[in-house]
Image (cartoon, helix red, strand yellow):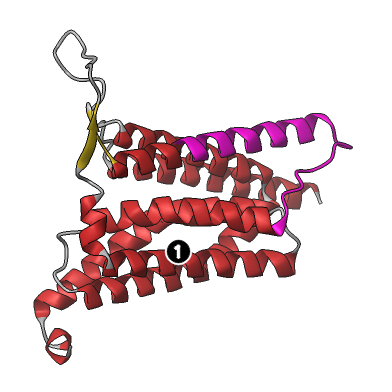
């Protein structure tokens, strides 16, 4: 353990893993921010704490069971037929692994959840007296648990090969979770105060869900493309928020 503290390779791996875990944690933060926005403040803070604690717990458990996690990538079923384009490119990977199943199931869950939330937001705008979504605290925690498990598997499998020591991986995950916790509160409050930002966050969930399904089917969409699109859209939305505030000040 002490030799890790003086090893440049261990520190380099720690920094790289921490950055990667923080970037991958953006998906978690967006999903949790959307869900806890429905709860009154004391419960919202509690749900956010539980959600991020479970995210850390699942990642640590998977790290100590890294051999089992790697085994999730082994095919356990082969589809007896193939679909291919005219150029010979396969539409999906016929060899199915448990990782593929988890990613597809998690992606579909995100797609369904985001679609329902968008529909709820639109109905709420059209019917100002309509009843808001009434997800219970327990139901919200259950949804956070499901998506935490999916993101944890994806995160740990992405981290495999970046470090040789589990201690370094756990430390990187802990740093990422702490930063996610600090950022999740302000992000959740901002999303709650700005309806258009909430709709943008839901659109992000649709994009993330689509990427997970595609990855599970054998189409890997580089995360850099996804996060660049999200960052660009968030920048545009930030300008919109600033413009609205400026108009309110001018009008007031």
How many other residues sit within 10 Å of disc 1, few (<14), some (14-19) or many (≥20)? Answer: many
Q: Residue at 49%, 45% (x, y): give it.
A: 234
The residue nearer to you, when weighing 251 against 200, is 200
Furthest-bottom residue in view? 2
Furthest-right residue in view? 129
Residue 93, image x, y percentages: 22, 28
Q: Residue at 17%, 18% (x, y): give it.
A: 89
Identify the image quadrant of the N terminus: bottom left
For the image shown, how many numbered marks are present on the structure?
1
Residue 214 vs 31, above or below: the answer is above
Q: Which residues are magenta?
A: 108-137
The residue nearer to you, when weighing 29 against 236, is 29
Left or right, 84 with reference to 180: left
The residue nearer to you, when weighing 248 against 65, is 65
Which quadrant of the view contains residue 166?
bottom left
Q: Residue at 42%, 46% (x, y): give it.
A: 231
Which quadrant of the view contains residue 161?
bottom left
């Amino acid at each position: 353990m002490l030799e890790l503290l003086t090893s440049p390779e261990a520190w380099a791996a720690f920094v790289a893993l921490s950055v990667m875990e923080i970037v991958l944690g953006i998906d978690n933060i967006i999903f949790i921010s959307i869900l806890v926005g429905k709860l009154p403040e004391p419960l919202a803070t509690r749900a956010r704490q539980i959600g991020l604690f479970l995210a850390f717990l699942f990642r640590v458990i998977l790290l100590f069971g890294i051999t089992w996690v790697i085994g999730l990538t082994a095919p356990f079923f082969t589809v007896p037929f193939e679909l291919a384009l005219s150029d010979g490119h396969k539409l999906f990977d016929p060899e199915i692994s448990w990782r593929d199943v988890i990613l597809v199931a998690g992606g579909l869950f995100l797609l369904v959840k985001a679609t329902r939330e968008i529909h709820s937001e639109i109905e709420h705008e059209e019917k100002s007296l309509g009843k808001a979504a009434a997800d219970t605290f327990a139901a919200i925690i259950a949804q956070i648990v499901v998506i935490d498990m999916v993101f944890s598997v994806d995160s740990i499998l992405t981290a495999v090969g970046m470090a040789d020591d589990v201690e370094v991986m756990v430390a990187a995950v802990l740093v990422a979770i702490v930063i996610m916790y600090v950022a999740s509160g302000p992000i959740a409050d901002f999303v709650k105060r700005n309806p258009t930002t909430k709709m943008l966050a839901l659109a992000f969930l649709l994009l993330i869900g689509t990427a997970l399904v595609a990855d599970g089917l054998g189409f890997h969409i580089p995360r850099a493309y996804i996060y660049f699109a999200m960052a660009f859209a968030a920048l545009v939305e930030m300008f919109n928020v600033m413009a609205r505030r400026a108009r309110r000040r001018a009008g007031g």
